[in-house]
Amino acid sequence: MDNISKAGQLFLRLGGYEAPSQFRACGQLLDAGAGLWRFDVAQNGLRDLLATLSEAVPQQAGGEIQALWQCGGEASVRPADALARVVSLEALHTWVDHEWIKGDLGSYLFSLLQPIVDLQSGGRLFAYEALCRVRAGDGSVIGAVDAFDVARRARRLEAMDVAAQLAAIEAKIRLMPQGMPLFINAMPNSLVQADYARHPLFAALRAHGVPAQEIVIEIVESERFEDVEMLATACDALRAQGVRIALDDMGSGYNGLSLLGALRPDFIKIDRDLVHGAHNSRMRSVMLEAIISLAQRLGCATVAEGLEEEQDVQLCCDLGVSYAQGYFFAAPDERPVAQERLPAVAAAKMVSPVPQVRLGDFLVPGAVMSVHEPVHAAQRRFRSDAALEFIVVLDDERPVGYLDRRFLRCTGKGNVGRYAKALEHILGATANAHSLLRRLFENGGRSQPWVVIDDVGRYMGTLALLGALDHLTKAGVPSSVHPLTNLPTGPVLRSLIDHRLAGEEWLHLIYLDLDHFKAFNDRYGFVRGDAMIYLLAEILRKTAAALPGVELGHIGGDDFLMVAPASVREVEEALEWLIVRFHELAVYLYDQDDFQRGYFSTESGGRYPVATLSVAVITGSEVRVTESVSASARAAYLKRLGKDRQGSVIVVEGRPLRMVPRAANEGRPAWYARLERALRGFPALGGSPAVDAWFADHPEFELVFRVDREGMQRGVNWINPAMRSFIKRGGAGVYRGDRPYFTMLKPECGAYLSSVYLSRATEDFCLTFCCPVWGADGGLEELWLGDISLKSLVG
């Protein structure tokens, strides 16, 4: 390959690929059966010819078409030598365009050093990361991503990886203080093939007397690697040499949780795309908290990458991130930045323990009426008191509904009980502070009364929201909540259970477990895995809202808890409703074929049923539990009784277990038809007032748009007024013909609801509802589409 400027001949073997027209214009077909071509190359013509041929063939073909370059001045090449010189067209083209990749890579590579600081000690310098760069023959500097892409195309990826590691060691020896750790990137494919006893990296460490304990090997998680067990074995061998392991780019790559569980790294490096702007993004901050919580439970230190803004630095510090790097501290440089040039980091904000709160301190009597009083009496009370917002309707001292000022427009007759609206916010007198503040945050506003009842369900009063909020926000709340579901977890949850069990009331503890969740997560990835956990949490909230005195917790992973007073008689019926509702909605978390079959398969060959729950109800009828540890052990025993059954199971202490059948695959629930009727009745020509009124009647829709038969969006998005600060009004002219709601529709197909996805606009789990409009000839005229959040669908 040193004579590329001379005249010669280029031979290509296409194999199964068809020759493009450019081949016939400048080459000669030697063997049609083998797809063998010859190209005569003039002096200094090889580079241009390779560019022409590479552009003509499909992208994937460049790596499979065989190429042999023979300089015109060379003697006849022996067959064995010719075979040894055969490379791919892609590699040959890369060698010609980037001459540096052919030679001694060590003479071109060098390292920049970027500091890694200790967030929890005010920004003290902890280590450096070595970032590879290439100084090409013309003096230009090539970044790591482009350089490794060149090495991949030239089939020198492993050689490049080793050369980058040696350049990092050279920078450490020359520039870094003794004892300072150095993070070095390494690719999984090169790690699993290494003989560490003779590996150049460890030879260099021994030659210069650098302890292996000062080296941290970063596994580049953005490179696809299938054999996780082989990589885990390689990491064990690396640890035996004394180095530590970091998992790079957590949150952006291919393997995620499976790599994390198998490698057990010392450090988890959180990807820049997740960290950057997290202080201003609910979804990013939630995912960031999830990774930090997981790392803490696994005993891994966390490193936040790409920090640029002070608010993100403070957020990471407050959330408990161990270390950080990014341009906020210093850019990568050939000369490492010293401690005195690094900015200081403010101490993490500590949250003080929450004092107990008594709801009785914030109760007001409120306006009440009996269900038997006439309509005109309620209207008279609203007219006589302009400040009156609600009237709570009681039946024998128990709240059964409420009236608001819109009741003044009621023209009906009879008793107010016929017209009372259902109460959604009912609090037991023993509700804890965290549960109360969480519910206030989630439901917010003063659109409905917050009613407080005693332990037998009698009305005590309504909550003075401003007083309760002021007290709770001044006191602070525990930070031990699950970042995805915002339900109590960890110490707060254990305290909740122990506090309720220590009281005199008799409780039901209900433990819920998603069956085969790990297999689902491995099969579909963590986004759908998070969506499944989020879905169950939202259904639990809907269930608990109808049961007075019930509180929820997220034990961790796929386990949840309901704490219910034994006096609540509807618990088991509510659990059956919960499971049926979960069956009904979980279809949109699976691929359709898997759900229709009733099971999904993993790469290991296992088969797992879809969308099932195991529920254990501890009533205390057999064994009285008095604290959270024994309750957890009792729940584990009860769940084991039903785990060997196919389908969702409820195991109630002291009674035979019951199966809850999965929702039938045929047919659609009633809400499906309601969504279709609503979307087909969208007032596209009615102007803004009509559109806003439609969204007020159908708040589950976040936006509506339409697509023509060619897949192009017609007009801009119609946006729910409540979502206008999150969603852009654009969209006109965007091609959507490659989306599932377009490609999967057929003339016989009715309305379609997509699988769950993560919305970039709202950073929430969403689905798209699609209504096709078919012409008289059976052809598609247009599609009407509406985006719906998963939370709204549950509601």
Image (spheres, helix red, strand yellow):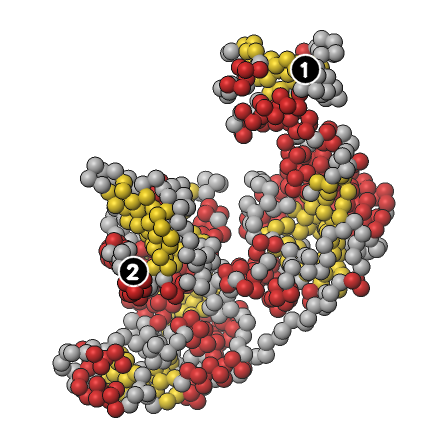
Residue neighbourhood size for the residue with mark 1, other residues' Cα within 10 Å, grouped as few (<14), some (14–19), many (≥20): some
Disc 1 designates what residue? Answer: 42
Q: Which residue shows up at 56% across the image and 27% down it?
A: 55
Q: Which residue shows up at 30% across the image and 50% down it?
A: 784
Q: Is residue 668 left or right of residue 441?
A: left
Q: Position of residue 311 (x, y in %)?
A: 61, 66
Query: Does residue 577 appear in the picture of this structure?
Result: no
Q: Residue furthest left?
A: 413
Q: Is residue 616 left or right of residue 316?
A: left
Specify the amino acid type for callout 2: Gly
Q: Which residue shows up at 77% across the image and 33% down it?
A: 137
Camera-nearest residue between 791 and 535: 791
Q: Quadrant of the C terminus?
A: bottom left
Q: Position of residue 309 (x, y in %)?
A: 63, 62
Disc 2 designates what residue? Answer: 687
Specify the amino acid type for callout 1: Ala
Q: Nearer the viewer, mark 1 or mark 2?
A: 2
Q: Which residue shows up at 54% across the image and 24% down it?
A: 56
